Amino acid sequence: MRTMRTTMRTTMRTTMRTTMRTTIWLVATASLAVGCKWTDFDDLASETWVDSTEKPEVKSSDYGIAIQRSSRMGDGGRLVVLGAGTATYSELAYNTEGEASFPPTEVSLQAKANVPNIGNSPILIADPSNDNTSLIVPSDNGVVILFGAQGMLTPYQLFGVTAPDGGATYMVAPSQAAPQPLVAIGDTVYGAVLPSLPAGTSQPTCKLVDSASPTTKLSIKALGVVRNSPATTDDVLMWEASGKLYRYPGSVFNGCATQQAQTAVVDTGFMPDTGSQILSIDGGTVVLQGHRGDNGVLRVFTSPSAAMIAPLGDGAMVAKLRTAAILDVQSGRYVIAGIPTALVEGKTAGQVQLFKIGATGLGTLPVATFNDAQPDNNQSFGRGVAAMPFNGSQVVAVAADNEVFVYFRANLADGTALYGETRRGR
Amino acid sequence: MQSRAVFVVWMAICALAAPHADAQPVDALKKAQTAFDQAQLDYLQGKYDEAARGFQDAYAARDFPQFLYNVGASFHMKGKKASDIESYQKAVEAYRSYLKADPKASDTAKVQKTIGVLEGEIKRLKDGPAPPATGTATGTPPATGTATDPKTPHVAAQPPAPSQEVKDLGDVKVRGLVVIESEPSNAAIYLDDKRKGPFAQTPWSGTLEGEHRVIIEKRGYTVIEKVVAADPSKLFVFAAGLSQQSFLGWIEISSNVPGADIFIDDKAAGAVGRTPLSQNIKPGKHTFWISAEGYNEYKEELEIVPNNTHAVKATLKGSPVGKLNVTGLGIEDATIIVDGKQLCERGPCLKGVQQGEHTITVRRPGYKTYSKRILIQAKTETQVRITLAPTASRSDAIVAGILAAGFGGGGVFLGLQAKKLKEDLQKEIDAGLLPPDSNDPRFTRGKIFAIAADATFAIAGITALTAIYYTFREKGAPSTGLIDVRALALRPEIGPGYAGIGMGVSW
C-alpha cells in the first residue's frame, strides 16, 4: 500500500510537472506561431489604396455634405469639405505621401455670412483654371457667393433673397480676364465678379427665354459652359426643368436689357431637378448629370457651334444618382457618379460608379464601382464626389457621412489600372 | 556389584576401542543409529537396562559423547525408580564418561551437579536402614524375607522414595543427536548465515534446536546447503558428500577487526559474511570491501586464479564515531539518508556516523523532505527529532496551469482571428477591387485582436510562470528537526545487586 501510494504520488507529480512543461511549451510555441504585431495593421492601413478621413474637430454634425477640389499649394492635394448642421467650410490637405491633415481652415458660415445651414445640394463649384472654389448658398440676407482662394474665404456678394436653385458655373466672360461665377436663380442668371464688383456697377442680370415661347418663364436647373472657338470667351449652357438644353451667348454674364433667347436648343429627354449638373469636358463637350426622384441620367452632349447642340451617344441611366464629377487621368476620361443611397450588400450604404467617356459618348455600364469595403446603412457614400488634383494627377475623392475617402490608386472592374499609385515614397 | 564391574569393564573397553569418528566406516554410523533408535524405544518403555545397553552399543559403533550421556540417563532413571544404588553408581560412571569424552560440553555444570546429587543419594541409601526387601526395578521378587518376623506374611517391599534432591532433578530425558559429516571431512560448517562465521568443522555432533540452514564448505569443493530441522529426541545424521571443483579459487578474508562486514563485488547486495571468512570463489576479478562501524572502509581488488588460495588482509583504521539518532512522529515511514547514502530504510534510526559534517536527509512520501547539515561529534549521540510537514496541495498550481492553458488557447484564437483579418485585408488591398480604406474597422478590429492576442499570451505566460512557481515553491511550514547532542561515556559500574558497564548521558 505504501509503495502504491508512493507510486501514485510520484506519478501525479510527474504528470503535473509534465503538464506544466507542456503548457508552457504550448504557450510559447503558440505565441511564436500566432503572436501578432499589432503595428502590422497600421502598416496595412497605410498600405491600402484608400485614405479615409473621419470628421476632424469641426463644429458641423454632418461633415462631408459636399466636397470640391481646392486650390493647390505645391504638390499633394487639397479638398474643400462642407459641413451641415452647423454650417462650416474647411479643407483637408494631403501631403505627397497621401497623409491627410486638417489645416486651420474651419470657418463658421453663420458667423461669416449669416448662413444658418446648408441644404442637401449646396452649389460648390471650382475654377477650372486654378481650382479656386466658390460656394453659392442662401443666407438670411440672400444668396451669397463665398470665394475660397488659397485656403481662405473672401468677399461675398448678395444677389437678393431668392434661393439659388438653378445652379452655377465658372465661365470666362467677356471683359473678364479670369473665369468668374455665373449664378442662376429661377429664369435669370447673375454675373459675379470676384473678388468684388467694380465700383459703381450694379449686379449684372439677364433673363433667359426660349425663343419659341419668349413669354414662358423658364426654370433653370443647371448651368454650364462651352468654349467658343476660336474666341476665348465661353458661351453658356442651360438645362431647364422641361429637359431642354439651351445655348446662350457668354454676354449674358454682363447682363442684358430685358431678356436673352438661346442660340441653340435640344431636348435631352430628361427633366432635371435641383442639383443637376452640366460638367464640361473640353471646349464643346459636356456631360449632363440629371436626377429627379430616384431616376438619374448621365449623357454627353456636344455643341460644336453656337447654333448646334447634339447628344453624343445614348448615355447611362443611373438610379438614385445625385452628383457627378469629371475625372481626367492617363487611362482616359471618366464620369464619377455619386449614388449615396445605392444598395450595397443589402444596405443603403451608397456607391460611386465610374463611366468611361469615349469618342461616341458614355458607356451604359460602369467600368468601376467604389463603395466602402465595410458598408453600412445611411453611410451616404458618394453624396459628394470630386477629382482631386494630387501630385500632378487626378484622384477620386468621395464624401460620405462624416467621412472623406480618397483613392490614391484604383483599378477598373476588369483589373486594369484606372490610375496607378499616385502617392510618393511607395 | 558384579554387574557394575562388568559395566566398568565395558566402559573401559569402549573407551579404548572407540576409534576416531572420521575413521569409522559408514555402516558403523548405521549401526549406531539402529542401536540408538532401539535404545530410545526401550527407554520410553521403562526398560532402562536394555536402553542403557543399546546406547552403549551405539557408542561402541560411534563414539558420540551424547550416547554416554544417554547411558547415564537410563541408569539414572532406573536408580530413581527403585532407589537402586548400583544403578545410581552406573549412572554416575556414565555421566563422568560423558564429561570426559566431551570436556567442553555446554551442560558440564548441570551434569556435574547431577553427579553430585546422585552420589549423595548413593551415600544416603547406603547409610540408611536396609530396606525390608529389595527387588529390582524390573519386578524381580525378593529372594529373602525379613529375619526378624518370620510370621509376617510376605508383602512386596516398597523401595525407599528418592530424596528431595533427586526429585528436584526431575525425570531425565535421553538426548537426540545431530551428526553432520562430510566426505572429505574438515569442512567448515555454517549455520543459517555465513556472516556469523564458521560454526564447526565436520564431523560434528551435538544438539540443534529448531530449524537451521546448514552450509558446508571446503576449499576446492562445492558448497552444500541443507535445511535441517532435527528432532531433539532422535539421532539425525547429515552426511554431505563434497564433490571437487578444481576450477574455483579460495579466498581467505581477515581483518584486524574481527566481525567486520565483507562485501564482494556488489555492496548493494549486502554483506556476504564477516571476518574471518574463507570460502570458494569464482575465478576472475573481484572487488572486496571490508567495513566495520567506526572504522574506515577497506577496499581491495583481486584476480582470483582457479585452485589457488588468495588472502585479503584488511587493516581497518578506526575513526572517531558519534551516534546519530533520528526519531520523530511517523519516522517509521521515512527513509533516512546521510550524505546521499541510505542510512536506514525506515526510522527510527540509531547508527554510528563518522565524526564530521554530514547532510542528513529524511524523506517520507507525502511530506516535505527534511534536509540539514549537521556536525556529528565523536563520543556523542546527536538526536534529531524530526517533525515532517505534509506536502502542500498543488491545486493552485493546477488552477494556474489550467488558466495558462485557457489564456494560451484564447491567445491562439485571437491570434488566428487577427491573422485571418490581416490576410483578408492584405488580399483585398492586393486585389485592388474595393480595397479597404485606412479607417476600415477591420484594421482596428485586427489591431484589437492582435493586441488582445499578445496580451493574452503575455497573461498566459505570466500565468504559466506562476504555475511553475506554484509547482515548485515551498508552500506552508517546512519540515523541522530538533537537534540534541548528548555526550556518551561508557564506564564500569558496581552497585548493590548489580555490576556492569554504565553510560552517563548529559545534554
Image (tube, coloured by chain):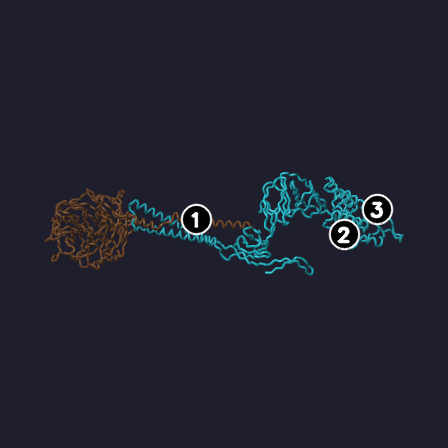
Instruction: Give the distance between the C-alpha atoms of the residues marked 1 and 2, in whole angstroms.
Output: 88 Å
Q: Secondary structure at mark 1?
A: helix
What amino acid does circle 2 point to?
A: Thr
| Residues behind callouts 1 and 2 on a single chain | no
**Chain containing mark 2:** B
Where residue B146 sits in the image (x, y, percent)?
Answer: 88, 52
The residue beneath circle 3 is B2
Quadrant where the C terminus of chain B sits is bottom right
Please give left or right for residue B47 compared with residue A57 in the image: right
Do we see residue A200 in this rendering?
yes
The disc placed on residue B139 is none
**Chain containing mark 3:** B
Mark 2 residue crowding within 10 angstroms, few (<14) / some (14–19) / many (20+)? some
Instruction: Please tell me which residue is depicted at 77% across the width and 54% down the height of the picture.
Output: B165
Please give left or right for residue B423 compared with residue B480 in the image: left
Please give left or right for residue B174 compared with residue A66 in the image: right
Do we see residue A346 in this rendering?
no
Instruction: Give the distance between the C-alpha atoms of the residues marked 3 and 2, in whole angstroms.
Output: 24 Å
First in sequence: mark 3 vs mark 2: 3
Is B313 in front, or is A359? B313
Q: Secondary structure at mark 2?
A: helix
Give the image quarter of residue A316.
top left
Where residue B400 sits in the image (x, y, percent)?
Answer: 44, 53
The residue beneath circle 1 is A25
Instruction: Give the distance between the C-alpha atoms of the residues marked 1 and 3, in whole angstroms.
Output: 107 Å
Instruction: Please tell me which residue is depicted at 59% across the width and 53% down the height of the picture.
Output: B319
What amino acid does circle 1 point to?
A: Trp
Is A94 in front, or is A8? A94
The residue beneath circle 2 is B114
Q: Nearer the viewer, mark 1 or mark 2?
A: 2
